[in-house]
Image (tube, rainbow, N blue to C red):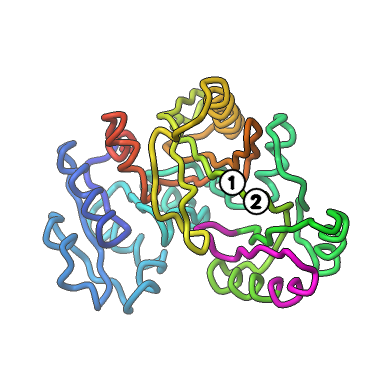
C-alpha cells in the first residue's frame, strides 16, 4: 500500500464504514463535513476533520475544496465512497494530478461506464446481449420512430446517457405519453448529472434485475464475488437485495458472471464495481456497470465473508 492517510470524501454511513476499514488497516483517516453536518458521527470517528464551504450536498460535490482539504491534512489518498464524486472521472483525474491515490476505478473506466452509449458499444463488440435500443443521444422524433417500430404492444424505457441510480428514467407504454415523459427525463437528467442526453431501449416489463459484484487489478486480471437480485424496487430505486440471486440455474449464473468478467476484463477494470443485467427466463441483457462501491455491498460481504472496502484499499 503506497499511502498512509486517506481523506474520506463522503458523509454518513458510508464515511463511517470507510473510516473503520482504514483504522483496521492502520491508516489515518480524515473526514470532511458541510456546515450542517458539524455534529455527524463520521467526524467524531475520524482522526481529524475539515469543514467544507457551503451546506448540504453541494459541499460534497466541490472537487476543488475536497482536494484542498486532502492537501491540508497531508493525506495521500482519497476514498469517495458512493454518490457525490465517486463516479466523476474529472475528479479522479484531479486527484491523480494532485499526487493523490484515487481509491476507485481509473478515470478512463469512469468515462467508459459513465457513458451508457460507450458501454453499449463495448458490450456489442464483446458479444454480450443487449436489449434493442438507440446507442446515441436520441431525439424525441427518433424515440417515437423506435417506439412505433416495436408494434402495437411495444413499450420503451427512456434513460439518461449519463445516468444512474434510477434517475432520468421513465417507461412509456403508449405513444401519447412520449412527449411528456421525454421532457421529464431530459430535465431530470440535466438536473442530476449536468447532462440531458437520453437514449431509449425496448422495455422488458417483467424482467429480474441481477447484478454481479466484480473486482479487478487494472491489468486485465478480474474476479467476481457472486451475484445479487435487486428486482424489488420503487421508482427504479432498489429496496431489497438478495444474495446470491435465487432461482437461477447453474448455467445461467455462470453465463452472467462470465459476461460480467468479459466486460470488466476488456475495460481493464481496477478496484470494485458491479455489472448489471435484466434477466427474463433463460435470457439476459446487459444494462449498465456501476464503477464504484455500492450501497448494497454489505449484502455480498455478509454472504461471502469478504471485506470489499478493505479490498478497495
Q: Residue at x 45, y 51 (%)?
A: 97
Determine the residue positioned at 11% across, 61% down: 44
Residue under the point 39% across and 50% down: 240
Badge 1 or badge 2: first in the primary sequence: 2
Q: Is residue 248 above or below residue 313?
A: above
The numbered mark at residue 139 is none
Asked if the residue at tag 2 contacts the one at tag 1, i.e. Cβ–Cβ closer than 8 Å, the answer is: yes
Q: Position of residue 128 (x, y in %)?
A: 68, 32
Q: Which stretch appears magenta? A: 163-182
Measured from the top left, where is residue 108 in percent x and y?
Answer: 57, 44
Place of residue 225 in the rendered image (x, y in percent of width and height, measured from the top left): 40, 29
Q: Which residue is mark 2?
A: 116
Q: Is residue 152 above or below residue 229?
A: below
Residue 307 lies in quadrant: top left
Mark 1 or 2, which is nearer the eye?
1
**Mark 1 Cα within 10 Å, few/some/many (few <14, many 20+)?**
many
Quarter of the figure with the N terminus: top left
Q: Element at badge 2?
A: helix
Amino acid at each position: 500500500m503506497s499511502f498512509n492517510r486517506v481523506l474520506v470524501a463522503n458523509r454518513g454511513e458510508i464515511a463511517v464504514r470507510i473510516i473503520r476499514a482504514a483504522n483496521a488497516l492502520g491508516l489515518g483517516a480524515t473526514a470532511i463535513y458541510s456546515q450542517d453536518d458539524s455534529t455527524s458521527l463520521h467526524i467524531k470517528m475520524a482522526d481529524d476533520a475539515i469543514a467544507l464551504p457551503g451546506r448540504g450536498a453541494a459541499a460534497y460535490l466541490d472537487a476543488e475544496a475536497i482536494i484542498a482539504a486532502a492537501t491540508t491534512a497531508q493525506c495521500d489518498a482519497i476514498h469517495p465512497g458512493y454518490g457525490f464524486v465517486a463516479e466523476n472521472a474529472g475528479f479522479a483525474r484531479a486527484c491523480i494530478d494532485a499526487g493523490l491515490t484515487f481509491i476507485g476505478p481509473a478515470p478512463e473506466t469512469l468515462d467508459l461506464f459513465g457513458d451508457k452509449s460507450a458501454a453499449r458499444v463495448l458490450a456489442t463488440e464483446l458479444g454480450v446481449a443487449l436489449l434493442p435500443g438507440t446507442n446515441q443521444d436520441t431525439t424525441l422524433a427518433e424515440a417515437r420512430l423506435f417506439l412505433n417500430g416495436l408494434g402495437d404492444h411495444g413499450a420503451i424505457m427512456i434513460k439518461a446517457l449519463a445516468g444512474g441510480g434510477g434517475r432520468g428514467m421513465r417507461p412509456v407504454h403508449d405513444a401519447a405519453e412520449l412527449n411528456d415523459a421525454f421532457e421529464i427525463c431530459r430535465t431530470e437528467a440535466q438536473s442530476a448529472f449536468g447532462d440531458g442526453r437520453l437514449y431509449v431501449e425496448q422495455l422488458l416489463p417483467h424482467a429480474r434485475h441481477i447484478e454481479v459484484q466484480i473486482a479487478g487489478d487494472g491489468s486485465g486480471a478480474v474476479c467476481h464475488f457472486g451475484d445479487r437480485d435487486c428486482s424489488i424496487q420503487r421508482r427504479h430505486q432498489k429496496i431489497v437485495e438478495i444474495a446470491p440471486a435465487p432461482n437461477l440455474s447453474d448455467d445461467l449464473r455462470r453465463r452472467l458472471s462470465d459476461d460480467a468478467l468479459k466486460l470488466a476484463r476488456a475495460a481493464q477494470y481496477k478496484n470494485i464495481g458491479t455489472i448489471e443485467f435484466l434477466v427474463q427466463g433463460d435470457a439476459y441483457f446487459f444494462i449498465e456497470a456501476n464503477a464504484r462501491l455500492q450501497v448494497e455491498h454489505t449484502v455480498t460481504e455478509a454472504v461471502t465473508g469478504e471485506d470489499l472496502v478493505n479490498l478497495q484499499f
